[in-house]
Image: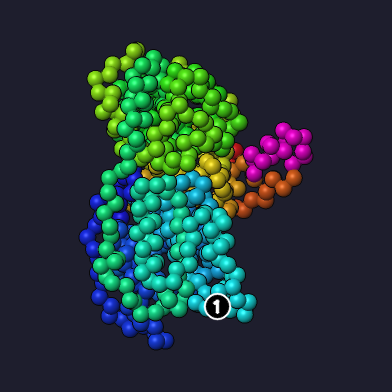
Amino acid sequence: MSTTLPTEIPTEISAEISVEISAPAEAGIPADNIGLAVMTTLRNYGIDTIFGIPGTHNLEFYRHLAPLGIHPVTSRHEQGAGYGADGWSQLTGLPGVVITTSGPGLLNAMSAAATAYCESRPLIILSPGAPRGSEFSDIGSLHETRDPTGAVRALIGRSTRVSSGAEAVELIHEAFDLFAHGRPRPVHIEIPLDLLESANDVDPSLCAARGLGPARNADAGALAAAVSVLARAANPVILAGGGSLRAGSALLELAELLQAPVVTTLNGKGAIPESHPLSLGSDIRLSAAQDLCNGADALLVIGSKVGESELWGGAIVPQGSCIRIDIDPGQLAVNLSADIELAGNAAAVVPALLAGLAGHIAAAQADVSVLKAQLQDEAREMSPVLARINEILAGVLPADTVIGGDSSQVTYFGTASFFPMDSAHQLLYTPCYATLGYGLPASIGAKVAAPDRPVVCLLGDGALMFAVQEFITAVEQGVDLPIICVNNGGYGEIKANMADRGIAPVGVDLAQPDWVKLAEGFGLAAFAVDNLDELGTTVTKAMAVRGPSLIHVAI
């Protein structure tokens, strides 16, 4: 399992893996079947962990995991499998892989699939389907679903029911190519049950991983025009989204060369170290950051759709020149028109801009300290308590701690602004899809991927209750994972929204379990914090615990 933090799908692929089949199959099903071809192909691309739940119809995927050296993580709900795969993916740079059973298992994973679509995350979902010839039937078969691929395709676009093993293998190759060279989004492959269990007729050479090649660069003329604009700019600003993470350290080099302040979206958090003097953190939703972008004479937007979910009602309307970089050409005009469009991978485009600007001397040294303080003040007004919680945690946790957040106030009012992060994928979060129930399984997946790296799950009680069954997954996987539950008694944000509209609270003040006893019942160590002065020392104790632990913080 990897402990490194790649910025994109690796282009150097491990050697081909082969497996000798020795265990006979039952019920006349050959052990060397199409399931083996599919799983071997994934293993050849470096996939050593899958997430899912074994079921009656997917056993011929699971048969091959142990011989191939693939570790299964069994969630207690397929939604958790999808989010676990996402956390694992962000810390390995490889796509997450989920195996579901047919019908309900597949549909249970759809919230996670839709999240991956919305947040542009690489995810492969494998599922068995109705045997060939029985599609769309209504005969009362187990897990019968009229059109599962049609349902999934409506949500994520890429959902295919294959007609051969070779087609299934080819779709895996296409998925890895997409993740490397296009906008990463989920891919679903349905294999009819009779095909999955049939003899393997796929040539072994077709299962070998393919080289993915270099990152795609932008048009040379557009690059030259962008270099010219940036070279003339007196006060350039960089807005970095999730797509900017592919640029790695080249983004910081570009910012320093231009002396350009960098503000990020939440998916771009850590694109440059937030301890750096040019970093304004992931506060693009705040008015002071938007004013900075709009007042720049050159705004460089990298890998962001600049969407409503990131701006919180604000607007990016630059008065100067606007340059956009995006791996998806279709995104270059979405929400924000650009004077110069650079369609390409930030991993190639940002270094190309650096090369074009070689020898450039910025007009002045940028000083963003006053604006940074202004942003902190603006963020603190939203929730001083949640700001303080995150500042306490930032003071006691290692600097490289990965925080698994959720659609909780403690995340978007707290961690976003008050837990500085110096590397990409340090905050696991879904700011656009904004689902509940993401944080815990994503944190488990991250810890499985990087067992030697500190990972902490920090979320609200409403979000945790969506995934409380995954406590036992954390126990089963043996992960050292402190889970900090900040309890405001229910759905605090929605309660505030109701108050803003003059609606008396309804359905938002929720009954609470005894969280300490609940956690202990699952086998977690558990701590109660009733005074924030105790939070730091309690978290330090939990970090020394072997296995998962719960810290319940009442506010």
Q: Which residue is mark 1?
A: 134
Q: Is 149 or 546 nearer to us in this picture? A: 149
Percent of width and height locating residue 250: 30, 32
Q: Quadrant of the C terminus?
A: top right
Q: Position of residue 237 (x, y in %)?
A: 42, 23
On the rendered image, what quadrant is the N terminus found in? Answer: bottom left
Q: Amino acid at mark 1?
A: Ser
389 part of magenta stretch: no
Q: Is residue 501 magenta?
A: yes
Please tell me whether residue 415 is drawn above or below residue 186 in the rendered image. Answer: above
Residue located at (39% from left, 29% from top): 274
257 and 418: which is toward the camera: 257
Q: How many marks?
A: 1
Horizontally, residue 5 falls left or right of residue 27, namely left
Q: Please give the range of residues in magenta.
A: 491-505
Relative to 34, say whether 235 is above or below.
above
Would you identify the image quadrant in which residue 486 lies? top right
Residue 457, percent from left and from top: 47, 46
Q: Residue furthest front?
A: 221
Q: Residues within 10 Å of mark 1 (few under 14, many from 20)?
A: few
Q: Classify mark 1: helix, strand or loop.
A: loop
